[in-house]
Image: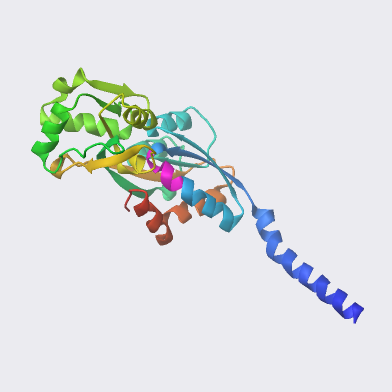
Amino acid sequence: MKVRRFASVVASLVSLGAQIAPHDASAAEVHVLCSMALKAVAEELFPQFEKSTNHKVTVQFALAATQKQKAESGEPFDLIIVTPAMLDDLIKEGKVAADTRSVVARSGLALVIKAGAPKPDIGTVDALKRTLLNAKSITYAKEGASGVLFAGVIQKLGIADALTAKTQYTSGGEEASANVVAGRAELGVLPVSEILPVKGAELGGVFPGETQQYIVMAAGVSAKAADGAAARELLKFLMAPSALTVLKAKGMER
């Protein structure tokens, strides 16, 4: 009886080892340079990927422009998530494998307000224009993808000069939302995906009609990835239909 029981235990351990060994043997660390626009999505999906594959994901969050500069300067990475135009530049420069270019998701421009503050009227283009002109102060990341798009919007509306004196430019979206939460600015401009996760802030409304612009995020695997197979696995995970629920919950869409 004891011999039979011992044999059963050994067989179970061997079977368990067979299941675990391949994962341990193929486990890799995937280094990701990720735009802030996809931060909320990444913070939920990357741990799921780690759990399902046994790979480890190390991620740096920053403005898309900053991530591009890092890649161009030679900083090692396995996967990068920036705007499509920036990704295309990196592909032309030989930094990213062309066959991995993937458009992950997009998020629309919106206003961020302090939690509990009255919702501004931006239901029409004229209403948005009035709201911006009447605002006591506005804040946004000048060099961020959303900031660049917003600058184009107010230029087309003919109100760029009128807003200059009351605009607080920031180095990133987190600083802009912090200005609103702290009461240093009445309105902030960010993509929806960067507003929803902020404690103490609320979505004030999305830009209407032709003023709506989308911050699009695209991803690609480094041409010199330390573990290209693992990086491609992560990219496939981001692009899978199962990720759509998370994208929608975080204010993004495919």
Relative to 117, is 103 above or below?
A: below
Q: Position of residue 209 (x, y in %)?
A: 14, 44
Relative to 17, is 187 above or below?
A: above
User: Among all residues in the image, which is located at the extreme bottom?
Assistant: 1
Residue 179 placement: quadrant: top left
Residue at left offset 48%, top offset 27%: 73
Q: Position of residue 183 (x, y in %)?
A: 31, 26
Residue at left offset 34%, top offset 29%: 176
User: Among all residues in the image, which is located at the extreme front?
Assistant: 116
For the N terminus, which image quadrant? bottom right
The stretch of residues the image draws in magenta is: 37-42
Closer-to-camera residue (112/73): 112
Asked which colour scheme the image uses, the reply is rainbow
Q: How many marks?
A: 0
Q: Position of residue 124 (x, y in %)?
A: 11, 42
Report whether 70 appears left or right of 138: right
Closer-to-camera residue (26/138): 138
Residue 226 placement: quadrant: top right
**Residue 205 highlighted magenta (yes or no):** no
Q: Main secondary structure of the magenta part?
A: helix
